[in-house]
Amino acid sequence: MTEPGITPASAADALAEIHARRDQAVAAALVPGWYWPAVGGLMVAFTAAVESHRPWLVAVGSVAYAIGLAAVVGLLVARHRAQVHKHIIGVRGASVIAGYALVLVALGVGAGFTAEAVGLSWPATVGTAIAGGAMTATGEPLMRYLRRMMTTRPLGGGR
């Protein structure tokens, strides 16, 4: 049964519009490519400052990191005002993001301990550089995967 005046073609057009709006919202909410190297670079600079064991450099590095991160996040928020709702990203998307973060942490910590074990100078900076590089290399593919996952989810929820 259909309402008078609602044709299958107009229903299909309305559904296509809903899909297009969802795709637009998903695209607007994803983290842009410049974010990954910016945060990775800030992480490495901060870690190097701390690992220098020079109080003045630790202070300057800490302040620079805080200002830099605030600027990166501020730009992200200002340019990408859309927010992904939990029913769009779903449990699977949240699990992918959590797993991604855990892998990056494990990679950085593992690389740092390995650098220390082989006697490299500044092992924490080495580990952070490897994690930051991995984040830079894999951030955009992660966003493409999440976009594909969110735009192929059935409208109205589901896992």
Image (cartoon, rainbow, N blue to C red):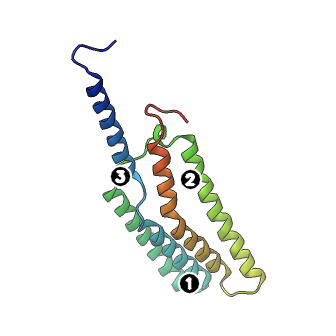
Q: Which of 66 and 102 is in front in this view?
A: 102
Q: What element carries label 3?
A: helix
Secondary-structure class at tag 2: helix
Label 2 crowding class (10 Å Cα cut-off): few <14, some 14-19, many 20+?
A: some
Q: Nearer the viewer, mark 3 or mark 1?
A: 3
The CA span between labels 3 and 1 is 41 Å
- CB-based contact (under 8 Å), mark 3 and mark 2: no
Q: Give the x, y percent position of residue 140.
A: 47, 62
Residue occupied by mark 1 = 55
Q: Which of marks 3 and 2 is nearer the N terminus?
A: 3
Q: In this view, does 129 lie above or below 141?
A: below
Percent from the top left, x then y, of residue 157?
48, 33
Determine the CA span between mark 3 and mark 2: 18 Å
The kind of residue tagged 2 is Ile
* Contact check, label 3 and label 1, Cβ < 8 Å: no
Q: In which quarter of the image is the C terminus?
A: top right
Residue at x 59% of width, y 59% of height: 101
Comes first in the chain, label 1 or label 2: 1
> Residue 28 shows which numbered tag?
3
Instruction: Say which amino acid is labelled 1.
Output: Pro
Q: Is residue 118 above or below residue 62?
A: below
The part of the image, by quadrant, that contains residue 128 is: bottom right
Q: Residue furthest left?
A: 5
In the rendered image, which residue does mark 2 sit on? 97
- Residue sitting at 56 percent across and 84 percent down? 55
Q: What element carries label 1?
A: helix
96 shown above or below 71: above
